[in-house]
Image (cartoon, grey):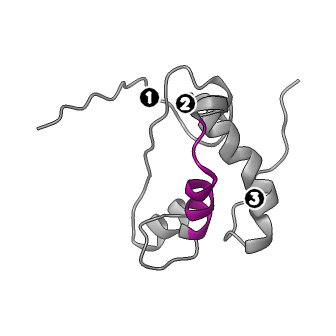
Amino acid sequence: MADSSPITVRTVRREDSDEWRPLWDAYNAFYGRSGDTALPEAITDSTWERFYDPAEPVHALVAEAARAKGCSRVYWQTRSDNAAGRVLYDKVAAHHGFIVYSKEL
């Protein structure tokens, strides 16, 4: 049975760290950064702190900011084998079948 729990988007708070950490760890594990290849703790700490540094280009609440600037949609990318992420994305957005390519110049 599909989980129909509503998704709440709000500004990140310092006390969210304990809930954010398992998500961060799972994200890194998905991309092969766990165990012997895990990121150093200092990277995790600095990543969390970036949410609070106005000089850093970390964009929380992207949809809200885009809407405020008059944008009509946002796009994002994920790996084709990110099944867990895609389950969530399919609930909140439309997949139009495109595959993204890039070329270093």
Query: Label 2, on which residue?
Result: 31
Q: Earlier in the sequence, mark 2 or mark 1?
A: 2
Q: From mark 2 to mark 1, how far is it between C-alphas?
A: 24 Å
Task: Write down the region rendered in magenta.
Answer: 38-49
Residue 66: mark in rendering = none
Residue 94 pos. (x, y %)? 53, 35
Q: Is 72 positioned to the left or the right of 83 in the image?
A: left
* Residue 85 horizontal side relative to residue 95, left or right: right
The residue nearer to you, when weighing 74 against 39, is 39
* Type of amino acid under label 2: Tyr
Residue underneath mark 1: 96
The picture places residue 18, in percent across and down from the top left corner, at 81, 58
- Considering every residue shown, the one lying at the far top of the view is 81
The amino acid marked with disc number 1 is His
Quadrant showing the N terminus: top right
Q: Where's residue 80, x and y in %?
A: 50, 22
Please report the residue visible at 44 percent of the width from the left and 28 percent of the height from the top.
Answer: 96
